[in-house]
């Protein structure tokens, strides 16, 4: 495990990164015309867009045309989760009460489930599906309507049998840490369930007993604050690895610093480097794992960021005409950047120079965006 203090020592490198932070490119993207020599498409992937018209729209990345509309029966879909074998998409509705299962190849719903009954509404605030798809873990709270009020129950972790469509077990909260929105994730092989609290608890997936623990709540070095990392998922990361931004307290200046880490959960190892003072920027890993991109979103100040992971630095910052609310995705081949939400359009930018190539309009405002870079076929 690499030391945080070691990452903070090379002040000259940090100064270079801070210089990169301070010198954004001020040019804005104003043309929607395709430029000569620009890539014709972003790859051969598929994009699944959940939308307000009670459907999922399937977009061919080669043309960015919607080729299929998959109706859902549970209302407005707002959260799309891909199964481990890429055969199914688990869809959560806008009321947080139902989970619907969509067969990707057939392009249709195969069923749904809810725990709400009568006057009791059970919100599914979080869920994660075991790689075998035999069961899922649901983070729930029950809301019961009375004559003059709603009774709100405690957060409950449930094991839900996806084969029998029934609750199979109630899971005790690890270390008694009840959470409305717990962060849970299965290991790639399904043997373990990771519970992200102040520490990372490793639970055996068969009986949910504690098998291991990674104490990230403890400072790695004396005088340093807690290593804060979100364990993001990316279609461009290897299974079991997580690459993203972290923050930590600089013990000398008493300020929050940010950097990039690549974490191996199974081995409890990570490699990282610092960039400079913490900024509210997003992070999206590019194919190949050598570059990443992000968006800085401040009213009147919207910027693309490019991170060079090989040279361990901020490669560039570029101001552009953004939207009040935006999501970012990197194309399958890494050549394009897709800016989506809020609304029914995707702005397509060249990843090399951030030129706006075109804007693609769709039939309904989108709520979620799921990229599957490897194309149309599920994993076997």
Image: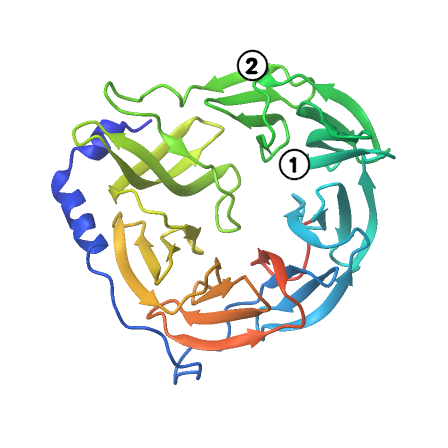
* Residue lying at the far front of the rendered structure: 148
Its colouring scheme is rainbow
* Residue lying at the far left of the rendered structure: 12
- Report which quarter residue 24 is drawn in: bottom left
Q: Looking at the picture, how far across and down is residue 275, in whole percent?
A: 25, 44
- x 69%, y 49%: residue: 94
- x 74%, y 37%: residue: 133
Q: Secondary structure at mark 2?
A: helix
> Left or right of 187: which side holds 308?
left
- x 52%, y 21%: residue: 201
On the image, numbered disc 2 is attached to which residue?
175
On the image, numbered disc 1 is attached to which residue?
125
Quadrant that contains the N terminus: top left
Please tell me how crowded label 2 is: few (under 14), some (14-19), or many (20+) other residues with Cα within 10 Å.
few
Camera-near label (2 vs 1) is 1
> Left or right of 50: which side holds 227?
left
């Amino acid at each position: 495990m690499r030391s945080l203090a070691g990452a903070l020592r090379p002040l000259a490198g940090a100064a270079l990164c801070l210089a990169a932070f301070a010198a954004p490119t001020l040019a804005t993207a104003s043309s929607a015309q395709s430029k000569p020599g620009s890539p014709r498409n972003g790859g051969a992937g598929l994009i699944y867009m959940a939308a307000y018209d009670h459907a999922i729209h399937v977009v061919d990345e080669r043309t960015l045309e919607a080729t299929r509309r998959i109706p859902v029966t549970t209302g407005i879909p707002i959260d799309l989760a891909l199964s481990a074998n890429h055969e199914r998409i688990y869809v959560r509705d806008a009321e947080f009460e139902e989970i619907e299962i969509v067969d990707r190849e057939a392009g249709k719903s195969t069923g749904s489930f809810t725990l709400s009954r009568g006057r009791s509404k059970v919100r599914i605030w979080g869920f994660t599906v075991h790689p075998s798809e035999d069961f899922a873990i649901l983070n729930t709270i029950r809301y019961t309507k009375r004559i003059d009020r709603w009774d709100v129950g405690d957060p409950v972790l449930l094991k839900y049998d996806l084969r029998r469509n029934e609750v199979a077990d109630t899971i005790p909260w690890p270390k008694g840490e009840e959470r409305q929105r717990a962060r849970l994730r299965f290991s790639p092989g399904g043997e373990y369930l990771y519970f992200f609290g102040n520490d990372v608890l490793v639970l055996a997936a068969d009986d949910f007993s504690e098998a291991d623990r990674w104490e990230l709540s403890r400072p790695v070095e004396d005088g340093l604050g807690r290593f804060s990392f979100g364990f993001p998922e990316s279609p461009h990361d290897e299974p079991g690895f997580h690459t993203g931004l972290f923050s930590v307290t600089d013990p000398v200046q008493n300020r929050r610093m940010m950097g990039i880490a690549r974490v191996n959960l199974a081995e409890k190892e990570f490699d990282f480097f610092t960039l400079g003072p913490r900024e509210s920027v997003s992070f999206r890993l590019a194919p190949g794992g050598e570059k990443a991109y992000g968006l800085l979103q401040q009213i009147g100040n919207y910027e693309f960021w490019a991170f060079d992971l090989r040279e361990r630095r901020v490669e560039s910052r570029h101001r552009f005409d953004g939207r009040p609310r935006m999501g970012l995705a990197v194309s399958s081949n890494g050549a394009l950047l897709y800016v989506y939400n809020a609304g029914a359009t995707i702005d397509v930018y060249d990843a090399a120079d951030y030129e706006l190539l075109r804007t693609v309009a769709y039939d309904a405002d989108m709520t979620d965006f799921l990229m599957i870079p490897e194309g149309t076929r599920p994993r076997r």
